[in-house]
Image: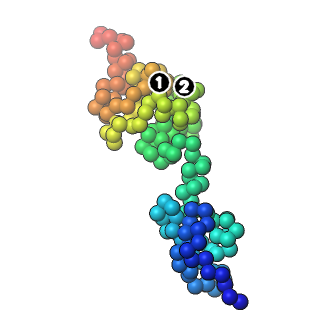
Amino acid sequence: MKRENLEGQTYGRLLAVKRIAAGSSGHTRYRCLCECGKTITAYATNLKRLRTTSCGCYAKEVNTKHAMYGTPTYHSWRAMIQRCTNPNNKDYAEYGGRGITVAPEWLTFERFYADMGKRRSKRHSLDRIDANQGYCKDNCRWATAKVQARNQRRYYQEYEQGPF
């Protein structure tokens, strides 16, 4: 039985570049080049039936509304959510456990990003201006560790109690 040659044909975002000899299973595979530049191997039947149409980049685009999954800004947002809402998080006792909350609109990354913008650099992280208040637009900023060191709860406690 002669097999159809798929080389040079496009399936979704994939271009079938080179046929790879069938292995012990007898299924023909192709080395494919995705539009994003990544190379993958796919079974011929999956290409023809359009079960495999990209290297996985399409699914990532479709499943994220903002295309910022995995960025430093996204990690900062996700860590904030975890600290304040997940009792299994190691830092929950210092945040959610003592009443630090996240503004309801910030439970979606898109709104958080619209308010805060991109994390400025590797040296910056999310900081609450008043360490005793929750995370919201008016109480947060991107700050360096040096700025944050002057903005700790103990500073507020000492200030409220006074020097004597």
Q: Nearer the viewer, residue 121 or 17?
A: 17
x and y percentages locating residue 50 in the rendered image = 67, 65
Judge from the rendering whether residue 133 lies leftward or rightward of residue 56; answer left or right: left
What amino acid is found at the position of numbered circle 1 in the picture? Lys
Q: Image quarter for residue 8?
A: bottom right
Q: Are marks 2 and 1 in contact (CB under 8 Å)?
A: yes
Where is 152 relative to 88, above or below?
A: above
Q: Secondary structure at mark 1?
A: helix
Q: Which residue is mark 2?
A: 103
First in residue order: circle 2 vs circle 1: 2
The residue at the point 30 percent across, 28 percent down is 147
Inspect this view and state whether residue 92 appears: no
Counting labels gives: 2
Q: Nearer the viewer, residue 2 or 64?
A: 2
Few, some or many C-alpha atoms within 10 Å of disc 2 (few <14, some 14-19, many ≥20)? Answer: few
x and y percentages locating residue 1 in the rendered image = 71, 89
Q: Which residue is mark 1?
A: 137
The C terminus, quarter of image: top left
Q: Image quarter for residue 152?
A: top left
Q: Secondary structure at mark 2?
A: loop
The residue at the point 66 percent across, 81 percent down is 4
Few, some or many C-alpha atoms within 10 Å of disc 1 (few <14, some 14-19, many ≥20)? Answer: some
Q: How is the image coloured?
A: rainbow
What amino acid is found at the position of numbered circle 2 in the picture? Ala
- The Cα atoms of the two marked residues, 2 and 1, are separated by 8 Å
Judge from the rendering whether residue 144 lies leftward or rightward of residue 79; answer left or right: left
